[in-house]
Amino acid sequence: MNRILLISLLLLSAACRSSTTVPSAEPKILRVMGSETLMPLTQQWAAGFMQEHPEISVHVLGGGTSTGVKALTEGQTEICAASRPLKPDEVKLIAEKYHSVGLSYLVAKDALSIYVNASNPVPSLSLDQVRDLFMGRIVNWKDLGGQDAPVDVFVRPPNSGTYLYFKEHVLFNELQAPTTLIVPTGKSMAEVVAKSIHGIGYGGIAHPSGIRNIKINGIEPTEENARNDRYPITRYLYFYVIDTPKGSTELFINWVQGETGQKIVRESGFISLW
């Protein structure tokens, strides 16, 4: 009996040691950082992806495209989310550090909408008029057929990819009016213009609540018009990585570009790739 009891205790002890020495699987962490425009969409991608791949934890941070590029260059994120192409000096820094110019992946398309308050009676603006408004050449809505009231101009901060895209493609790199007011995110831009009866700002078409996406050159900023490039301010949205993605990074990018990821794009008010 004593021998049987001893063998049983030894087997029990071995089983306990085995159960305590086998480590539990830690989730793999994937970091995505950058564009404020893309951030709400990236958060939805992350939530959907983690439901299918619970072994991977996707951390999403904003800060603007420039912040995301800096984090990518410094190895603080695996993916940079960007609402514009990389600038030459950004590519140069990556090349100098990694001997690679990086890789870009299209993840969605967006129409850069010009926001006005929902009560604003002006039906449409030309690109020249938009330029004049943001550069301070037009300062009263009556000059555009609206109310006799000063224009409140709102812009994004310089670290924003949306700001740089607007500066390059609408302002042609000229200086905006010094009286413009800076708004940190696309979401807050829509909220500010919704509260400002005489306000004007810009952002993605996915922020329509309380505002009106005004026609540009008589063309509505809709998915169809953006997809066929009839709408004049249309852009792609990107993921950037340093080198050929592998493991969880490759899996996530493929998922985003695939059927489920692009369905989330459409549901979020952006324009899917396919």
Image: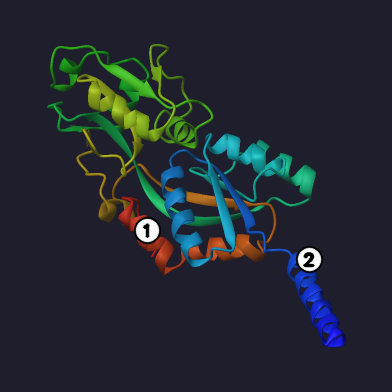
Image location (x, y in percent) of residue 47: 45, 55
Residue 273 percent coordinates (x, y): 40, 61
Which quadrant of the view contains residue 261? bottom left
Secondary element at image label 2: helix
Q: Amino acid at mark 1?
A: Ile
Q: Nearer the viewer, mark 1 or mark 2?
A: 2
Q: Position of residue 258 (x, y in %)?
A: 45, 67
**Residue at mark 2:** 21
Q: In this rendering, is residue 25 above or below 97?
A: below
Residue at 71% of width from left, 44% of height from top? Answer: 75
Q: Are marks 1 and 2 in contact (CB under 8 Å)?
A: no
Q: Residue at x 52, y 44 (%)?
A: 82
- Marks 1 and 2, how far apart at CA: 41 Å
* Amino acid type, mark 2: Thr
Residue 84 visible, this orientation: yes
Q: Which residue carries the number 1 mark? A: 264
- At a point 81% along the width and 82% down the height, the residue shown is 5
**Foreground residue, 101 or 271?**
271
Residue 263 appears in which quarter of the rendering? bottom left
- The C terminus lies in which quarter of the figure? bottom left
Residue 264 relative to residue 195: left or right: right
- Helix, strand or loop status at disc 1: helix
Q: Is residue 48 above or below residue 208?
A: below
Q: Nearer the viewer, residue 13 or 145?
A: 13
Q: For this view, does 76 lie left or right of residue 132?
A: right
Q: Residues within 10 Å of mark 1 (few under 14, many from 20)?
A: some
Residue 216 appearing in the image: no
